[in-house]
Image: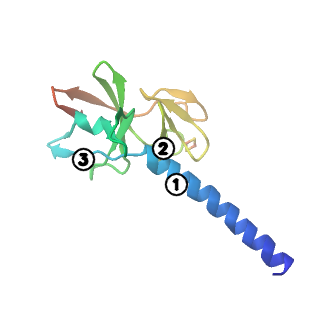
Amino acid sequence: MERKDFILKCGQWCVSAVVGGSLLQACSTTYYATNTMNGNILSFSKKEFQEVRKDGQTRQRKFVLLRSLRLNYPICVFALGDDRYSALLMVCTHNACELNPTGDYLICPCHGSEFNNTGKVQNPPAEIDLQSFKVTHDENNIHVHL
Ligand code: FES
């Protein structure tokens, strides 16, 4: 193998490792909840926040994502504790990039803005908080009012 081919192969391997690792990390934390639409209300079970692991253990998710045909971006529903929730449109208020959920934050991959789990700007360049939706719940289900 010539030196040029070797360098090219090493470069391809490095890019594959970085991209693959990022995708695996994103997949392990991103979960779309099954939901139903009734009028302007998206509803889903509170059980969607429970993650059953391979060993049978369960753990509580910090957030789940919802899709609606009415919106061009997903909604991130955060569990804030004590049966309180926030529902945030995952579009950056700086320049409309789709946000990535990470722990208790939504982070913009375009220029690095960060928003907390109630949609408040934590880091610029975004200056405007995220669009949020009213959330209600009953014993078993959570309802996001669009
Ligand atoms: S579009 Fe999100 S920080 Fe610029």
Depth check: give the residue in front, 52 or 61: 52
The three-letter amino acid code for the residue at tag 2 is Leu
Q: CA distance from mark 2 to mark 3?
A: 20 Å
Q: Amino acid at mark 1?
A: Leu
In the rendered image, residue 16, in percent from the top left (x then y), is placed at 62, 63
Q: CA distance from mark 3 to mark 1?
A: 22 Å
Q: Residues within 10 Å of mark 2 (few under 14, many from 20)?
A: many
Tally the numbered discs: 3
| Secondary structure state at the residue bearing disc 3 | loop
Q: Which residue is mark 1?
A: 23
- 3 with respect to 117 (left or right): right
Circles 2 and 3 in contact, beta carbons < 8 Å: no
Whether the residue carrying mark 3 lies under 8 Å from ligand 1 is answered with no
Q: Quadrant of ligand 1?
A: top right
Q: Secondary structure at mark 1?
A: helix
Q: Nearer the viewer, residue 83 or 76?
A: 83
> Colour mode?
rainbow
- Mark with earlier residue (3, 1): 1
Q: Nearer the viewer, mark 1 or mark 2?
A: 1
Q: Is residue 8 above or below residue 81?
A: below
Q: Which residue is mark 3?
A: 34
Kind of element beneath mark 2: loop
Can the viewer see residue 145? no
The answer to which image quadrant residue 111 occupies is top right
> Residue 50 in the image: x percent, y percent?
30, 36
Do the numbered discs 3 and 1 sit on residues whose CB atoms are within 8 Å?
A: no
Residue positioned most to the front = 55
Which residue is pictured at 49% across the width and 46% down the height? 96
Of label 1 and label 2, which has the lower sequence position? 1
Q: In the image, is the residue at mark 2 within 8 Å of ligand 1 by its beta carbon?
A: yes
Q: What is the number of the mark on residue 99? A: 2
* Image quarter in which the C terminus is found: top left
